Amino acid sequence: MDKIDRKIVNLLQTNARASLKELSKACFISSPAIAARITKLEKAGIITGYHSSINMEKIGFHVKAFIQVQLEPRQKQEFYPYIQSIPNVIECNCVTGDYSEIMEVIFPSTTNLDDFINTIQQRFGKTSTQIVFSTSVDHRGVKLSASQDEK
């Protein structure tokens, strides 16, 4: 990635709907050159998708939580497909520490959250849950420096 590629990535992280014309103007190269660079970044697996940021409360999801799950290694084969099938799981990561998995989840109510936690506990074991009161930093990209070494 060169300086222009990093600028394109930064701009798309800020606004995934930025037009080729806008990107072209910001990077001082033609729209076809921008399109070619974006295609190259997608093929390289650097750009993996384009997303909308949704206010979950406005669509009825008022409870966000982080659930840690203590899994035995043998349970992962069952856990991963199960958890991928639950649309309320926004993200799930395998982590170090006493709990092997941590999930970010969103539900309409604490009753729905409680039902989900009970299901997880019955199927997989011990959990620890933290309900989010507020979010000081939303999901965001990582700003790439224009002076980073090329790779």
Image (spheres, rainbow, N blue to C red):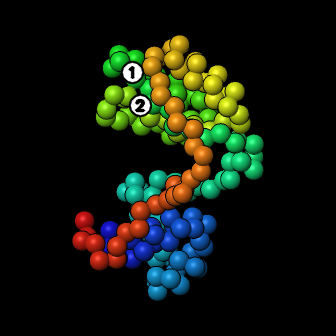
x, y percent for residue 91: 50, 40
Residue at which label 2 appears: 101
- N-term-proximal mark, 1 vs 2: 1
The quadrant in which residue 16 appears is: bottom right
Crowd tier of the residue under label 2, counting other residues whose Cα lies within 10 Å: few below 14, some 14–19, many 20 or above = some
Identity, as a three-letter code, of the amino acid under mark 1: Leu
Q: Which mark is residue 88?
A: none
The residue under the point 31% across, 32% down is 97
Q: What residue type is labelled 2?
A: Glu
Circles 1 and 2: CB distance less than 8 Å? yes
Above or below — where is 115 with respect to 42?
A: above
Residue at screen point 68% across, 53% down: 55
Q: Residue at x 71, y 36 (%)?
A: 108
Residue 42: x and y in percent read 44, 58
Q: Nearer the viewer, residue 77 or 88?
A: 88
Q: Which image quarter is the N terminus in?
A: bottom left
Seen from the viewer's position, the closer of residues 11 and 143 is 143
Q: Identify the residue at image location x=41%, y=62%.
A: 142
Q: Distance between the residues labelled 1 and 2?
A: 7 Å
Camera-side residue of 58 and 132: 132
Residue 80 visible to the viewer: no
Numbered-mark total? 2
On the image, numbered disc 1 is attached to which residue? 71
Left or right placement of residue 119 versus residue 2 in this view: right
10 or 122: nearer the eye?
A: 122
Q: In which quarter of the image is the C terminus?
A: bottom left
Image position of 134 with respect to 41: above or below: above
Task: Say above or below: 61 vs 2.
Answer: above
- Say whether residue 35 is left or right of residue 133: left
Task: Please tell me how crowded label 1 is: few (under 14), some (14-19), or many (20+) other residues with Cα within 10 Å.
Answer: some
Secondary structure beneath disc 1? loop
Secondary structure under badge 2? strand
